[in-house]
Image: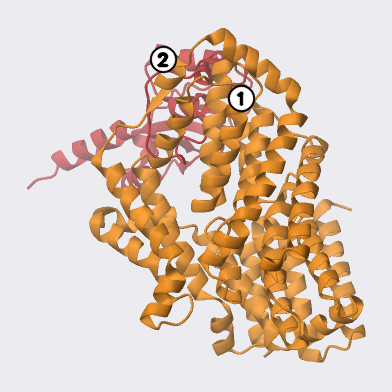
Chain colours: A orange, B red
Amino acid sequence: MNKITFKFILLFFLVFIVGFISHKVGLNTQQMLAVSIFSASVFATLLFWDFRVAIAFIGIALLLITKTVDLENMVKFASLEVILFLVGMMVLVGLLKEVGFFAWLVTLILRIKNLTAYKFIFVISVLSAGFACCIDEVTSIIFMTAAILEICDYFDVDPTPYIITSVIATNIGSSGTVLGNPIGILIASKSGLTFEDFILKAFPLMCIALLSAICITMFWYRKTIKILDSKIKQSLNNEILIKLISVPPEKQIKLVLSIFGLTLLFIALHHRLELLLGLEANTILLSVPLISAGLVMIWKWRKAREYIEKDVEWWTLLFFLLLFAKAGTLKYTGATDVIAQKISFIVKGNPAMLLSAMLWISALGSSILDNVVLVAAFIPIVQSFKDLGFALQPLWWALLFGGCIGGNITLVGSTANIVALGILEKERNIKITFFRWFGIGLVTSVVAITIVWISLLFLPIYR
Amino acid sequence: MKVKEIMTKDVTSIAAETNAKEALDLLQKREISGLPVMDANRKLVGMFTEKEVLSAILPSYIEKVGRFVYMENPKAVRQKARALSTIKVKDIMRQDVITVDEDTALCEVARLMLTQKARRIPVLNKIREVVGIVSRGDILRALFEEYSSDTP
């Protein structure tokens, strides 16, 4: 039996099981159809990743043809506001790249005074997490990987531990704000949580989780760090390293920095501005990247088309859009209400048990599934818990942290992992085995998620 | 005018198993920027060009990291350039090659060169053997020769 036949058989088997369970839990025909088509799309996406957009197209068409959802609701559930937010941010990130903003930041690492290996690992972790908080995690990890490779080459050391550390920090960091990971903005737009909520509640918890991961990686790679340390001491100064790359200091960088800074500021203040101006929730949050991107496209009007065509990841965004629409159908048909009732019955209506299950299941799930797929599926279920009397806020945080940190467990857990390891393999011919990643990935994730778990359970701020 | 009338028929080629550094030396010796890679049956298996060598020795992420300036040559580039003598042409050649058949019109070849950004295009016969190669210069020369003979 060849691999493709096996995958098809597995797909039918999995969908059959989901269909069977749906029937057993008492879903009606429409609900069963919505659950089956959605799960078929998710499993097919997992098994045939390169065909995910084609699968999403066919999946949504099937939902429409079978009258599982109507056109009006499909458009509503597609969450165009989230997609437009991501488009705006991608245009801005395109401009930042073009003026050399990221390379400029990387040169800052090269200029660290009295560099030591521990200082290096700390700085790359904090920068990776910081980058992942402000821009998307994929752009962030490309720059960090590039910087780490250049530095490790200079000192002639194996870059693998530092790249793994940077990826782990990136995934943890992406839970700190609504900007780091698409699930952040997705949760913010569906939950009513504001950027301020993220800064006050998610960001500190992210910092503690990051600190735990930094300590663990420093211990885990202590032997490798010693080697780097001795190489750094031998080299006396890193003058050649500093000279390696440069970004001409231009007015443009300052101007672009101001635009980006102002965008972040307005995003951070969105809730207060919405209250002040009497606007609907998230109006400012979703409009600010569009205004900034619009201004950028007026300023650089000759390149506007290039920003839209090259810097916006339409492939990914179309996948998200259709995925959101399919997941919304679960809510529309009432399937998630039934699922939520069953889950509530299993956890005996206990909020702490529900929170724990949500956190650990989303973490384990996102270690094998794309976290956006997972979170898109969970969002309508979480919304259904509201009618059952559960407080939703802890569940949203559980979903956010589980979805982001869980990506660290395996080497295919998040896009950042795949991108960084792809570059490492291509550039240095180093192929990381599943278990080499799994060891450090699992330990850092379990510790970080346990920190989140305890905080969500016991700190009143998260209730 | 058809491409078979102007193509270079004596095609220099290299084998996929050739050492990449030797293949690069051959390009430089002949002062050309690319060569077709053929198997023992004269079937085209790829294209080996200076561009492929450059993308093999420079970091793969340079297009993604945006604007920056190299002030020094990084060690990795030097190491990859040295490693060229340990790899084969098949490891870095481009496999997806634009080809035309012998009876293709010159303008069609020119269109392909422009839209597909190809500097030279191998010409294949009916049984898919390489029978010639045509460059941008060949096309331009032939087109202008043809048009200059037109009466105004």
Give the spatial CA distance, label 2 vs label 1: 18 Å
Which residue is the site of mark 1? B16
Mark 1, chain letter? Answer: B
Can I make out residue B91 in this image?
A: no
Q: Quadrant of residue A177?
A: bottom right
**Amino acid at pointer 2:** Gln
Amino acid type of disc 1?
Ala
User: What chain does badge 2 belong to?
Assistant: B
The structure residue drawn at horizontal position 67% and vertical position 76%, both measured from the top left corner, is A327
**How far from the left and from the top, in percent, is residue A417?**
66, 44
Q: Residues within 10 Å of mark 1 (few under 14, many from 20)?
A: many
> If you read the primary sequence from the N terminus, does the residue marked by circle 2 or circle 1 appear first?
1
Q: Residue B28: give its label.
A: 2
Q: Indicate the quadrant where residue B136 lies.
A: top left
Looking at the rendered structure, the secondary structure element under dot 1 is: loop
Measuring from the top left, give residue A202's x and y in whole percent.
62, 59
Q: What residue do we see at 74% from left, 27% from top?
A: A221
Which quadrant would residue A390 be assigned to in this image? Answer: bottom right
Do callouts 2 and 1 mark residues in contact (Cβ within 8 Å)? no
Looking at the picture, tell me which residue is in the foreground, A209 or A144. A209
Q: Residue A292: where, in percent of width, then height?
A: 34, 61
Counting other residues with Cα less than 10 Å from the Cα at mark 2, is it few (<14), some (14-19), or many (20 or more)?
A: few
Q: In x, y percent, where is residue A356?
A: 82, 65
Residue most extreme to the front: A460
Q: Are marks 2 and 1 on the same chain?
A: yes
Q: Which residue is found at the position 75% from the left and 36% from the top?
A: A216
Q: Secondary structure at mark 2?
A: helix
- Comparing B65 with B81, the one in front is B65
